[in-house]
Image (cartoon, grey):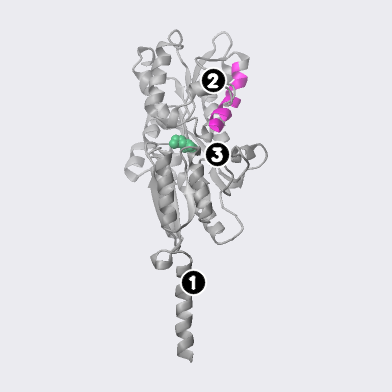
């Protein structure tokens, strides 16, 4: 009788595992699908690899794919994760075309975490984890104020700035821009800073579309800067450029370097992501600043969040704060609010270029070049 009981027990366990619709992979590991947007911006390669490592450190199978900035491709990749039984999806989307994949994931009862880019057009998911993107922008604005010494500038000799923004498909770009504009506007209103080219005061204004850069494509920013230099900026010398991230900052500076007017002095140019090539540029006195977002910390926090949610535990992720007050807007999807966890960004200039180095953000060979 005992033998029969044992056999029946084993059979029951085996059937119950199978009954989960093959949700468990061989070896019984729960699958986490990691959908990254692109690789033409260096940080996303790191994000994807770090998310996979953090998932596997916690006993999950981490499947990662990059979508070459093409949302239909990413949607197919997400479908693939679901077919492989993913119980959680970490999604850095390209645009709101991801909404159909979110609906599919919900049907499969897979948990969705929007990763560093909010999923707009639905609040049919629970969590968004990112950096304080408004603060990213204020840091960019503050670096321009410092770089131009605007507190000592006069209306008799105003400084000139031109504005660039990130992709119009990426809600982060709105907050980067607004944080910077909210810092710069008092100097513009005082008359000590003058905007050359399109001048939106808020990302909701039509002029924002003229400074936005589709899919964060560096060639688009470079071409627009070249047109500005022979257009709106032909009769002035630009003292600064608001650039929303490092890939665009370097493309803009390439255009300036080809213009004789800027051989001796490049405009004070902001950035973001602490990319290695920009860290070198900052060290060499070309790009003025970047904003370091420790994506290793973001990846770890995202997996801790997913792990807590998968285990039905209370959400308590070290190194993050829940967006509240004015910052709650960062978690607005267009149709409602999702719980948003924020990490802190850090401004990096020539004076503290060692911050990302010390954080281990670069390879040893790269770090040696920044010593
Ligand atoms: C944003 C992200 C930034 C920037 C940009 C380009 O969503 O927050 O870090 O790199 O994408 O991919």
Q: Label 2 crowding class (10 Å Cα cut-off): few <14, some 14-19, many 20+?
A: some
Question: Which residue is nearer to you in this view: 290 or 215?
Answer: 215
- Left or right: residue 304 compared with residue 27: right
Q: Which residues are magenta?
A: 174-188
| Residue position marked by numbered label 1 in the rendering | 16
Q: How far apart are the alpha carbons under marks 1 and 2?
A: 58 Å
The answer to whether the residue labelled 1 contacts the one labelled 3, judged by CB atoms less than 8 Å apart, is no
Relative height, residue 233 to residue 180 (above, below): above
The answer to whether the residue labelled 1 contacts the one labelled 2, judged by CB atoms less than 8 Å apart, is no
Relative height, residue 64 to residue 168 (above, below): below
| Residue position marked by numbered label 2 in the rendering | 207
Q: Is residue 77 visible?
A: yes
Q: Position of residue 161 (x, y in %)?
A: 50, 18
| Residue position marked by numbered label 3 in the rendering | 120
Main SS class of the magenta portion in the image: helix
Name, please, the residue furthest toward the bottom. Answer: 1
Q: Position of residue 117 (x, y in %)?
A: 51, 40
């Amino acid at each position: 009788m005992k033998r029969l009981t044992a056999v029946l027990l084993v059979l029951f366990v085996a059937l119950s595992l199978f009954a989960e619709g093959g949700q468990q992979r061989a070896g019984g590991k729960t699958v986490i699908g990691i959908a990254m947007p692109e690789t033409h911006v260096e940080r996303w390669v790191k994000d994807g690899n770090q998310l996979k490592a953090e998932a596997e450190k916690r006993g999950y199978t981490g499947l990662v794919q990059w979508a070459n900035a093409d949302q239909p491709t990413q949607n197919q990749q997400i479908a693939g994760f679901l077919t492989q039984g993913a119980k959680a999806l970490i999604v850095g989307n390209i645009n709101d075309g991801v909404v159909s994949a979110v609906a599919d994931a919900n049907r499969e009862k897979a948990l969705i975490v929007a990763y560093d880019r909010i999923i707009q057009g639905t609040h049919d998911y629970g969590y968004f984890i990112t950096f304080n993107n408004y603060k990213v922008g204020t840091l960019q604005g503050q670096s321009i104020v410092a770089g131009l010494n605007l507190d000592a500038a006069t209306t008799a000799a105003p400084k000139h700035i031109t504005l660039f923004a990130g992709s119009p498909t990426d809600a982060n770009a709105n907050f980067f821009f607004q944080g910077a504009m909210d810092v710069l506007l008092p100097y513009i209103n005082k008359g000590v800073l003058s905007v050359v080219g399109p001048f939106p005061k808020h990302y909701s204004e039509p002029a924002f579309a003229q400074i936005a850069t589709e899919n964060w494509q560096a060639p688009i920013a470079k071409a627009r800067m070249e047109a500005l230099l022979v257009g709106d900026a032909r009769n002035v010398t630009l003292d600064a450029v608001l650039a929303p991230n490092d890939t665009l900052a370097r493309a803009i500076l390439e255009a300036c370097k080809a213009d004789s007017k800027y051989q001796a002095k490049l405009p004070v140019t902001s950035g973001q992501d602490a990319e290695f090539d920009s860290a070198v540029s900052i060290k060499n006195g070309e790009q003025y600043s970047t904003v370091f977002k420790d994506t290793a910390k973001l990846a770890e926090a995202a997996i801790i969040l997913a792990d807590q949610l998968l285990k039905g535990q209370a959400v308590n992720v070290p190194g993050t704060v829940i967006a509240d007050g004015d910052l709650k807007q960062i978690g607005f999807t267009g149709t409602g609010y999702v719980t948003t966890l924020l990490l802190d960004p850090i401004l990096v200039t020539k004076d503290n270029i060692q911050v990302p180095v010390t954080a281990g953000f670069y390879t040893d060979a790269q770090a040696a070049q920044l010593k």
